[in-house]
Amino acid sequence: MSIYKIVVILHSSHFSTMASSSSTNPMIICLFLLFLSLQTKHASSSPWSLSACYDSIIGFGDSLADTGNLGNLYPSDPPLFMYLPPYGETFFHHPTGRCSNGRLIIDFIARYLDLPLVPPFYDGKNSSDVGSVNFAVAGASALPDSYFLSKGIAIRQANTSLSDQLGWFKNKFLPKFQCPSERQSFLRSALVLVGEVGGNDYNHALLDGTSKDLVFTFIPDVVGAISSTVKELINLGARTLIVPGNLPIGCSATYLSQFKSSNKSDYNPKTGCLNWLNEFVSNHNKQLRAQLDLIQKEHPHTDIIYADYYNAAMRFYLHPDKYGFSKGALTACCPKCGPYKVDNPEAETCDVPSQYVSWDGLHLTEAAYSILAKGLIKESYTIPQIEQICANHMFNRSYAVPPRIVL
């Protein structure tokens, strides 16, 4: 039996009038659609599984989450690097626009929720369907283009920042809902992934030679842009949001190549990662968490979940063999594939990507992303833990008073 029931009380004469009318009251259509949604929702799900909590995924971010938007926004000849083999070889057996040999974190989260893979918003189909949707774009930044132009920093591609993605969501996707109640029901039952984003605000500047002292000053502004987006999504009706911190870029093969140091004290003796870069990321993550805590206090009926990408990843940088990365954590499987220089550029693509953490020097392998996603969904690397959030939702639903709608 469904947890929810909607009791619609109609005055008999009013009902008769409507039945004989040649036009249908839009309010009745909306209520009927909402009724069907609630009655059929989660009918096949076990009461405490994640699939019982979330009906869809809405994604924002950069190349860690882009499932194919960039190539449709900026088609090129020859294709962009992520649209060429060997990208996508492991799972899809062809390039999909994902910056990896296979699936990304967002793909694994969809699997844990028993949902289909999240399609890119710009998939070339111009569909009117509403469901899971991904606005993430490889190379996107949290801050708008104007911020970087004012500092003399080149932009990889224009109009893909977090504010641009939010604009697509508000102005192009949400209008597909004809009924406000249907839109609100969709947003309340969606898991919204805000990132990872912010990494490129630092990557583009640092890897193109901008002073690290200048780039360090970006952190409050980057965190502010992410926080502003979270607030706006909440105001639009989002109920559950996952906001990831940044990965330990001091362990990235690209950064290790570009910022090679002869000073041994610059490196962590346990991981071989560059200390100053990881300290920089830790600062970003600390400031982001502090802002999310403030937003949570302002919106007690919304669940804001911090995804600790940094510590989830640090496990395999500390103990790569334990996680099956027999080739180590700091060597890229395909050092010639990515957009930046990596040591050993003559090397060919590795035969077994799952033995590597790094795919192309900047992005990770499917195997690494799988471990990160498991850490978020099944282990303790979301704060608060998402499974506990889901259990709370289901408990509250079980004891909620059914809404009574009177016309």
Image: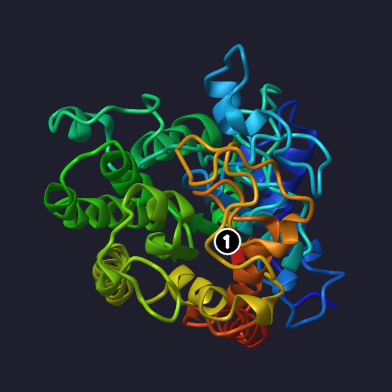
At 74% across and 78% down in the image, what residue appears? 49
Residue 108, by quadrant, is bottom right
At 58% across and 24% down in the image, what residue appears? 80
283 above or below 152?
below
Per the image, label 1 sits on a secondary structure element best described as strand
Along the viewing direction, whichever of 65 and 265 lies nearer the viewer: 265
Residue 308, by quadrant, is bottom left
Q: Which residue corresponds to mark 1?
A: 191
Residue 148, x across and y down, in percent = 21, 33
Residue 287, x across and y down, in percent = 24, 68
Residue 388, x across and y down, in percent = 58, 85
Q: Please, which residue is most extreme toward the top here?
A: 77
Name the amino acid, label 1.
Answer: Leu
Q: Residues within 10 Å of mark 1 (few under 14, many from 20)?
A: many
Q: Please, which residue is most extreme toward the front here?
A: 262
Q: Does residue 288 appear anywhere in the picture?
A: yes
At 37% across and 36% down in the image, what residue appears? 161
Name the image quarter holding the C terminus: bottom right
Q: Does residue 305 appear anywhere in the picture?
A: no
At 64% across and 41% down in the image, what residue appears? 98
| 240 left or right of 28 in image | left
319 above or below 16?
below
| 72 left or right of 50 in image | left
Name the image quarter holding the N terminus: bottom right
Residue 138, x across and y down, in percent = 50, 38
Residue 208, by quadrant, is top left
How did the renderer colour the structure? Answer: rainbow
